[in-house]
Image: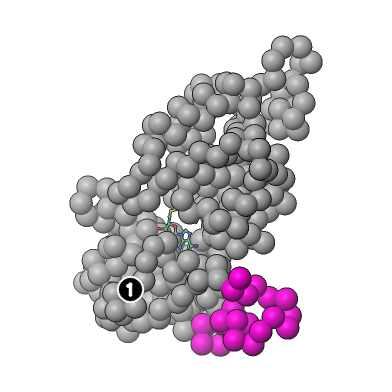
Amino acid sequence: MTRKIRAAADGRDAGGAGPRRGIVHLVGAGPGDPELLTLRALRRIREAEVAVCDHLVSEAILSLLPAKCERIYAGKERANHALAQDEINKLLVALAREGRRVVRLKGGDPYVFGRGGEEAEFLARYGVDFEVVPGVTSASGAAAYAGIPLTHRDYTAAVTFVTGHRRSGRCELDWPALARPGQTLVIYMGLATLAEICEKLAAHGLAATTPVAVIERATTARQRVVTATLADAAARVAAARVAPPALVIVGEVVRLREQLDWFDAARLAGDAWGLPLPS
Ligand code: SAH
Protein backbone atom coordinates (compact mmCIF):
# COMPACT_ATOMS: atom_id res chain seq x y z
CA MET A 1 0.00 0.00 0.00
CA THR A 2 1.38 3.42 -0.86
CA ARG A 3 1.83 5.95 1.92
CA LYS A 4 -1.07 7.98 0.58
CA ILE A 5 -3.46 5.05 0.53
CA ARG A 6 -2.40 3.90 3.97
CA ALA A 7 -2.96 7.42 5.31
CA ALA A 8 -6.39 7.54 3.71
CA ALA A 9 -7.24 4.10 5.04
CA ASP A 10 -6.33 5.24 8.54
CA GLY A 11 -8.52 8.32 8.17
CA ARG A 12 -5.61 10.77 8.09
CA ASP A 13 -4.95 13.38 5.51
CA ALA A 14 -2.30 12.28 3.04
CA GLY A 15 -0.16 15.39 2.73
CA GLY A 16 -1.62 17.46 5.55
CA ALA A 17 -2.85 20.21 3.20
CA GLY A 18 -5.92 20.15 0.98
CA PRO A 19 -9.26 18.42 1.31
CA ARG A 20 -9.28 14.86 2.58
CA ARG A 21 -9.11 12.24 -0.15
CA GLY A 22 -11.93 9.78 -0.22
CA ILE A 23 -11.42 6.07 -0.29
CA VAL A 24 -13.51 3.02 -1.18
CA HIS A 25 -13.21 -0.10 0.95
CA LEU A 26 -14.50 -3.14 -0.96
CA VAL A 27 -15.51 -5.21 2.03
CA GLY A 28 -16.46 -8.88 2.02
CA ALA A 29 -19.28 -9.30 4.54
CA GLY A 30 -19.22 -13.10 4.51
CA PRO A 31 -22.21 -15.35 3.95
CA GLY A 32 -24.50 -14.05 6.69
CA ASP A 33 -23.46 -14.91 10.24
CA PRO A 34 -22.04 -11.60 11.52
CA GLU A 35 -19.44 -13.46 13.58
CA LEU A 36 -17.84 -14.53 10.31
CA LEU A 37 -16.80 -10.95 9.56
CA THR A 38 -13.07 -10.36 9.70
CA LEU A 39 -11.74 -7.89 12.27
CA ARG A 40 -10.81 -5.60 9.38
CA ALA A 41 -14.30 -5.78 7.89
CA LEU A 42 -15.84 -4.93 11.26
CA ARG A 43 -13.52 -1.95 11.64
CA ARG A 44 -14.32 -0.63 8.17
CA ILE A 45 -18.06 -1.07 8.80
CA ARG A 46 -17.87 0.81 12.10
CA GLU A 47 -15.95 3.68 10.49
CA ALA A 48 -18.10 3.93 7.36
CA GLU A 49 -19.44 7.36 6.35
CA VAL A 50 -21.45 5.99 3.46
CA ALA A 51 -22.20 2.34 2.71
CA VAL A 52 -23.19 0.94 -0.66
CA CYS A 53 -24.72 -2.46 0.10
CA ASP A 54 -25.81 -5.38 -1.99
CA HIS A 55 -28.87 -7.42 -1.10
CA LEU A 56 -26.90 -10.45 0.14
CA VAL A 57 -25.60 -8.56 3.17
CA SER A 58 -27.56 -9.66 6.21
CA GLU A 59 -29.58 -7.31 8.43
CA ALA A 60 -27.42 -8.35 11.38
CA ILE A 61 -24.40 -6.95 9.57
CA LEU A 62 -26.13 -3.79 8.32
CA SER A 63 -27.05 -3.05 11.93
CA LEU A 64 -23.33 -2.67 12.70
CA LEU A 65 -23.07 0.44 10.49
CA PRO A 66 -22.95 3.69 12.47
CA ALA A 67 -26.37 5.36 12.86
CA LYS A 68 -25.14 8.45 10.99
CA CYS A 69 -23.74 6.44 8.08
CA GLU A 70 -25.64 7.02 4.83
CA ARG A 71 -26.87 3.77 3.32
CA ILE A 72 -27.38 3.18 -0.36
CA TYR A 73 -28.87 -0.12 -1.51
CA ALA A 74 -27.41 -1.24 -4.77
CA GLY A 75 -29.72 -4.23 -5.03
CA LYS A 76 -28.35 -7.08 -7.10
CA GLU A 77 -31.09 -9.64 -7.06
CA ARG A 78 -31.06 -11.93 -10.09
CA ALA A 79 -32.85 -10.10 -12.91
CA ASN A 80 -33.72 -7.26 -10.54
CA HIS A 81 -30.65 -5.08 -10.26
CA ALA A 82 -31.64 -1.95 -8.38
CA LEU A 83 -28.61 -0.20 -9.85
CA ALA A 84 -26.81 -1.38 -12.97
CA GLN A 85 -23.15 -2.31 -12.47
CA ASP A 86 -22.06 0.71 -14.43
CA GLU A 87 -24.11 2.99 -12.16
CA ILE A 88 -22.60 1.38 -9.07
CA ASN A 89 -19.09 1.92 -10.43
CA LYS A 90 -19.79 5.59 -11.12
CA LEU A 91 -21.47 6.06 -7.76
CA LEU A 92 -18.42 4.72 -5.92
CA VAL A 93 -16.15 7.13 -7.76
CA ALA A 94 -18.50 10.07 -7.13
CA LEU A 95 -18.80 9.33 -3.39
CA ALA A 96 -15.05 8.95 -2.95
CA ARG A 97 -14.48 12.21 -4.83
CA GLU A 98 -16.60 13.95 -2.21
CA GLY A 99 -13.78 13.02 0.18
CA ARG A 100 -15.82 10.39 1.98
CA ARG A 101 -14.92 7.04 3.48
CA VAL A 102 -17.02 4.68 1.40
CA VAL A 103 -17.68 1.07 2.35
CA ARG A 104 -18.86 -1.12 -0.51
CA LEU A 105 -20.38 -4.06 1.35
CA LYS A 106 -20.63 -7.26 -0.60
CA GLY A 107 -21.82 -10.73 0.33
CA GLY A 108 -19.13 -13.36 0.81
CA ASP A 109 -15.81 -12.40 -0.72
CA PRO A 110 -15.67 -9.39 -3.08
CA TYR A 111 -13.48 -11.25 -5.57
CA VAL A 112 -15.54 -14.46 -5.82
CA PHE A 113 -18.43 -13.96 -8.26
CA GLY A 114 -19.02 -10.61 -6.62
CA ARG A 115 -17.97 -8.24 -9.41
CA GLY A 116 -15.46 -6.79 -6.98
CA GLY A 117 -12.89 -7.09 -9.73
CA GLU A 118 -14.93 -4.87 -12.04
CA GLU A 119 -15.42 -2.27 -9.32
CA ALA A 120 -11.74 -2.27 -8.40
CA GLU A 121 -10.77 -1.89 -12.07
CA PHE A 122 -13.07 1.10 -12.39
CA LEU A 123 -11.71 2.73 -9.23
CA ALA A 124 -8.14 2.15 -10.39
CA ARG A 125 -8.95 3.64 -13.79
CA TYR A 126 -10.34 6.80 -12.20
CA GLY A 127 -7.50 7.12 -9.71
CA VAL A 128 -9.64 6.53 -6.62
CA ASP A 129 -7.88 5.05 -3.57
CA PHE A 130 -9.32 1.70 -2.63
CA GLU A 131 -8.74 -1.28 -0.39
CA VAL A 132 -10.11 -4.83 -0.68
CA VAL A 133 -11.07 -6.68 2.48
CA PRO A 134 -11.52 -10.39 1.78
CA GLY A 135 -14.51 -12.18 3.25
CA VAL A 136 -15.58 -15.74 3.94
CA THR A 137 -16.99 -16.84 0.62
CA SER A 138 -20.33 -18.66 0.75
CA ALA A 139 -18.66 -21.88 -0.41
CA SER A 140 -16.55 -21.91 2.77
CA GLY A 141 -19.42 -20.80 4.98
CA ALA A 142 -21.95 -23.24 3.53
CA ALA A 143 -19.49 -26.12 3.57
CA ALA A 144 -18.54 -25.56 7.21
CA TYR A 145 -22.09 -25.03 8.46
CA ALA A 146 -23.54 -27.92 6.44
CA GLY A 147 -20.86 -30.40 7.52
CA ILE A 148 -19.38 -30.87 4.04
CA PRO A 149 -15.58 -30.51 3.80
CA LEU A 150 -14.84 -29.13 0.33
CA THR A 151 -11.81 -31.37 0.05
CA HIS A 152 -11.01 -34.63 1.79
CA ARG A 153 -8.09 -36.90 0.94
CA ASP A 154 -10.36 -39.94 0.71
CA TYR A 155 -12.72 -38.38 -1.83
CA THR A 156 -11.38 -35.38 -3.73
CA ALA A 157 -8.22 -33.97 -5.19
CA ALA A 158 -9.75 -30.75 -6.43
CA VAL A 159 -12.51 -28.26 -5.84
CA THR A 160 -13.92 -26.07 -8.59
CA PHE A 161 -16.07 -22.97 -8.15
CA VAL A 162 -18.37 -22.17 -11.06
CA THR A 163 -21.35 -19.95 -11.68
CA GLY A 164 -24.62 -21.44 -12.88
CA HIS A 165 -25.81 -18.04 -14.02
CA ARG A 166 -26.65 -17.97 -17.71
CA ARG A 167 -25.08 -15.20 -19.68
CA SER A 168 -26.62 -15.82 -23.06
CA GLY A 169 -29.55 -18.05 -22.24
CA ARG A 170 -27.47 -21.14 -21.46
CA CYS A 171 -24.89 -22.27 -18.92
CA GLU A 172 -21.66 -22.21 -20.88
CA LEU A 173 -19.43 -24.39 -18.77
CA ASP A 174 -16.74 -26.94 -19.53
CA TRP A 175 -19.00 -29.94 -18.92
CA PRO A 176 -16.52 -32.74 -19.76
CA ALA A 177 -14.07 -31.30 -17.19
CA LEU A 178 -16.77 -30.70 -14.56
CA ALA A 179 -18.21 -34.21 -14.95
CA ARG A 180 -14.92 -35.90 -14.11
CA PRO A 181 -15.22 -37.82 -10.83
CA GLY A 182 -12.88 -37.29 -7.88
CA GLN A 183 -13.54 -33.58 -7.46
CA THR A 184 -15.92 -31.28 -5.63
CA LEU A 185 -18.00 -28.85 -7.61
CA VAL A 186 -19.39 -25.71 -6.01
CA ILE A 187 -22.00 -23.88 -8.03
CA TYR A 188 -22.82 -20.27 -7.19
CA MET A 189 -26.08 -18.87 -8.58
CA GLY A 190 -27.04 -22.38 -9.63
CA LEU A 191 -30.55 -22.67 -8.25
CA ALA A 192 -32.46 -21.55 -11.34
CA THR A 193 -30.35 -23.74 -13.60
CA LEU A 194 -30.05 -26.76 -11.29
CA ALA A 195 -32.02 -29.12 -13.54
CA GLU A 196 -29.91 -28.21 -16.54
CA ILE A 197 -26.68 -28.52 -14.55
CA CYS A 198 -27.56 -32.00 -13.26
CA GLU A 199 -28.63 -33.16 -16.72
CA LYS A 200 -25.44 -31.90 -18.33
CA LEU A 201 -23.19 -33.49 -15.68
CA ALA A 202 -24.99 -36.82 -16.08
CA ALA A 203 -24.87 -36.60 -19.89
CA HIS A 204 -21.10 -36.10 -19.66
CA GLY A 205 -20.63 -39.20 -17.57
CA LEU A 206 -20.95 -38.23 -13.90
CA ALA A 207 -22.73 -41.07 -12.03
CA ALA A 208 -26.42 -40.42 -11.36
CA THR A 209 -25.81 -41.54 -7.75
CA THR A 210 -23.32 -38.71 -7.10
CA PRO A 211 -24.48 -36.83 -4.01
CA VAL A 212 -25.64 -33.22 -4.25
CA ALA A 213 -26.34 -30.73 -1.47
CA VAL A 214 -28.17 -27.45 -1.85
CA ILE A 215 -27.65 -25.04 1.02
CA GLU A 216 -30.11 -22.17 1.38
CA ARG A 217 -29.18 -19.07 3.43
CA ALA A 218 -25.99 -20.69 4.64
CA THR A 219 -24.67 -19.73 8.10
CA THR A 220 -27.86 -17.90 9.07
CA ALA A 221 -30.58 -18.91 11.50
CA ARG A 222 -32.69 -19.80 8.46
CA GLN A 223 -30.15 -22.16 6.89
CA ARG A 224 -31.71 -25.21 5.22
CA VAL A 225 -29.88 -28.07 3.55
CA VAL A 226 -31.41 -30.40 0.98
CA THR A 227 -29.37 -33.48 0.10
CA ALA A 228 -30.08 -35.57 -2.96
CA THR A 229 -28.34 -37.23 -5.89
CA LEU A 230 -27.64 -35.98 -9.36
CA ALA A 231 -30.74 -37.87 -10.50
CA ASP A 232 -33.27 -36.32 -8.13
CA ALA A 233 -31.71 -33.04 -6.91
CA ALA A 234 -33.80 -30.75 -9.12
CA ALA A 235 -37.07 -32.42 -8.09
CA ARG A 236 -36.20 -32.43 -4.38
CA VAL A 237 -35.12 -28.82 -4.39
CA ALA A 238 -38.32 -27.80 -6.18
CA ALA A 239 -40.41 -29.82 -3.71
CA ALA A 240 -38.66 -28.16 -0.75
CA ARG A 241 -39.20 -24.73 -2.38
CA VAL A 242 -35.61 -23.73 -1.86
CA ALA A 243 -35.14 -20.01 -2.48
CA PRO A 244 -32.04 -17.90 -3.20
CA PRO A 245 -29.42 -17.39 -2.01
CA ALA A 246 -28.50 -21.03 -2.31
CA LEU A 247 -25.29 -22.82 -3.09
CA VAL A 248 -24.97 -26.20 -4.79
CA ILE A 249 -22.25 -28.68 -3.85
CA VAL A 250 -21.74 -31.80 -5.98
CA GLY A 251 -19.40 -34.62 -5.02
CA GLU A 252 -18.71 -37.53 -2.71
CA VAL A 253 -17.78 -35.18 0.16
CA VAL A 254 -21.51 -34.45 0.57
CA ARG A 255 -21.82 -37.90 2.21
CA LEU A 256 -19.72 -36.65 5.16
CA ARG A 257 -22.60 -34.44 6.25
CA GLU A 258 -24.19 -37.45 7.92
CA GLN A 259 -21.32 -37.52 10.43
CA LEU A 260 -20.16 -33.91 10.39
CA ASP A 261 -23.29 -31.81 10.66
CA TRP A 262 -22.70 -29.85 13.87
CA PHE A 263 -24.81 -26.77 13.10
CA ASP A 264 -28.25 -28.39 13.00
CA ALA A 265 -27.16 -30.59 15.91
CA ALA A 266 -26.34 -27.45 17.92
CA ARG A 267 -29.70 -25.95 17.04
CA LEU A 268 -31.43 -29.05 18.37
CA ALA A 269 -29.28 -29.36 21.46
CA GLY A 270 -29.53 -25.73 22.66
CA ASP A 271 -26.82 -23.19 23.23
CA ALA A 272 -24.73 -25.15 25.74
CA TRP A 273 -21.42 -24.44 23.95
CA GLY A 274 -22.18 -20.95 22.71
CA LEU A 275 -22.55 -22.23 19.14
CA PRO A 276 -24.49 -20.12 16.64
CA LEU A 277 -28.22 -20.50 17.18
CA PRO A 278 -31.31 -19.13 15.51
CA SER A 279 -31.98 -15.63 16.78
N1 SAH B 1 -19.31 -12.92 -3.45
C1 SAH B 1 -20.24 -13.95 -2.99
C2 SAH B 1 -20.98 -14.59 -4.12
C3 SAH B 1 -21.91 -13.68 -4.87
S1 SAH B 1 -22.80 -14.49 -6.14
C4 SAH B 1 -19.47 -14.98 -2.17
O1 SAH B 1 -18.23 -14.95 -2.13
O2 SAH B 1 -20.12 -15.81 -1.55
C5 SAH B 1 -24.31 -14.87 -5.33
C6 SAH B 1 -24.40 -16.34 -5.04
O3 SAH B 1 -23.62 -16.68 -3.90
C7 SAH B 1 -25.79 -16.80 -4.68
O4 SAH B 1 -26.57 -17.05 -5.84
C8 SAH B 1 -25.50 -18.09 -3.96
O5 SAH B 1 -25.19 -19.14 -4.84
C9 SAH B 1 -24.23 -17.72 -3.20
N2 SAH B 1 -24.51 -17.29 -1.81
C10 SAH B 1 -24.18 -16.10 -1.27
N3 SAH B 1 -24.55 -16.07 0.04
C11 SAH B 1 -25.09 -17.27 0.30
C12 SAH B 1 -25.65 -17.86 1.47
N4 SAH B 1 -25.73 -17.21 2.64
N5 SAH B 1 -26.12 -19.13 1.38
C13 SAH B 1 -26.05 -19.81 0.22
N6 SAH B 1 -25.53 -19.30 -0.90
C14 SAH B 1 -25.06 -18.05 -0.87
Q: Could you tell me if residue 147 is visible in this image?
A: yes
Q: Amino acid at mark 1?
A: Arg
Q: Which residue is mark 1?
A: 241
At 68% from the left and 75% from the top, the residue drawn is 275
Crowding near the residue tagged with mark 1, few <14, some 14–19, many ≥20 C-alpha atoms within 10 Å: few
Q: Is residue 80 magenta?
A: no
Q: Could you tell me if residue 124 is visible in this image?
A: no
Q: Which picture quadrant has residue 133? A: top right
Quarter of the figure that contains the C terminus: bottom right
Compared with 174, 158 (above or below) is below
* Distance from mark 1 CB to nearest ligand 1 atom below 8 Å: no
- Pinpoint residue 121: horizontal percent, then vertical percent: 49, 31
Instruction: Find the residue positioned furthest to the top.
Output: 17
At 58% from the left and 26% from the top, the residue drawn is 96
Report the span colored magenta. 256-279
Q: Which picture quadrant has residue 225? A: bottom left
Q: Is residue 277 magenta?
A: yes
- Pinpoint residue 156: horizontal percent, then vertical percent: 48, 74
Q: Is residue 255 left or right of residue 201?
A: right
Quarter of the figure that contains the N terminus: top right
- Pinpoint residue 211: horizontal percent, then vertical percent: 38, 80
- Colour mapping used in the image: one colour
At 27% from the left and 48% from the top, the residue drawn is 167
Of 118 and 9, nearer the camera is 9
At 52% from the left and 26% from the top, the residue drawn is 93
